[in-house]
Image: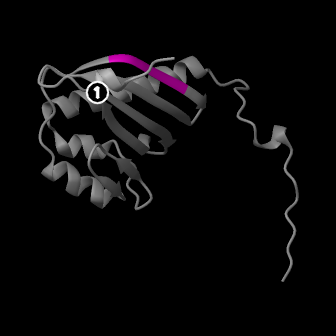
């Protein structure tokens, strides 16, 4: 069976601000991101997991694990050691792409390691609020890092 796909113009699929206040959207996501970070530092796993989309399609790639789906993320959080209570963020950037989507990226440092951590999250607004649909955490040795 042959099927054809009609081309979609760039304007039909482009993300446009229109009348959306993207600064306000970014501020909303930053507030959610900050609340997530506070829960993470408190080791409040139920609250941390509550920031993730309740879906088998949610993905979190960590430093040493892959979690596909909210149940896998919950299992990981249940086994995860607490982050250092003096964890510090730097170069946190939140970018809104539409009224309902944004990314949050940051670097983190802790006094118990020389590694530089990196964290990125994709946030989507659902009827119940902002949720992380995809996250990635990694770290790098400072002497192995190239900054452009």
Question: Which quadrant of the figure has residue 22?
Answer: top right
Question: Which quadrant of the figure has residue 36?
Answer: top left
Residue at position x 40%, y 62% from top? Answer: 56
Which quadrant of the rendered structure holds the N terminus?
bottom right
Q: Residue 93's x, y, as percent?
A: 46, 20
Q: Count numbered badges in the picture.
A: 1
Q: Residue 91's x, y, as percent?
A: 40, 16
Q: Secondary structure at mark 1?
A: loop
Please give the range of residues in magenta.
90-95
Question: Which quadrant of the figure has residue 4?
Answer: bottom right
Q: Which residue is mark 1?
A: 141
Task: Give the class, few, some or many, for how many residues have Cα within 10 Å of label 1's Cα (few <14, many ≥20).
Answer: few
Residue extending farthest front? 143
Colouring used for the render: one colour
- From the viewer's perspective, tell me whether residue 121 is left or right of residue 88: right
Q: Residue 148's x, y, as percent?
A: 51, 17
Q: Compare residues 94 and 131 and report the one nearer the observer.
A: 94
Please name the predominant secondary structure of the magenta segment in the image. Answer: strand
Q: Compare residues 114 and 12 and report the one nearer the observer.
A: 114
Q: Compare residues 58 and 126 and report the one nearer the observer.
A: 58
Q: Is residue 20 magenta?
A: no
Q: Is residue 94 magenta?
A: yes
Q: Residue 27's x, y, as percent?
A: 46, 20
């Amino acid at each position: 069976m042959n099927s054809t796909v009609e081309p979609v113009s760039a304007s039909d699929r482009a993300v446009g601000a229109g009348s959306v206040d993207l600064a306000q959207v970014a501020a909303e996501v930053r507030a959610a991101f900050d609340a997530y970070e506070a829960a993470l530092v408190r080791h409040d796993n139920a609250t941390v997991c509550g920031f993730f989309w309740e879906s088998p399609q949610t993905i979190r790639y960590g430093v040493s694990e892959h979690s596909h789906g909210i149940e896998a993320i919950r299992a990981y959080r249940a086994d995860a050691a607490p982050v250092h209570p003096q964890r510090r963020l730097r170069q946190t950037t939140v970018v809104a792409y539409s009224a309902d989507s944004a990314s949050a990226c940051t670097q983190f440092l802790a006094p118990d390691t020389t590694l530089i951590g990196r964290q990125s999250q994709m946030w989507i607004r659902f009827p119940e609020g902002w949720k992380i649909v995809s996250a990635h955490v990694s770290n790098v040795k400072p002497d192995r890092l190239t900054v452009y």
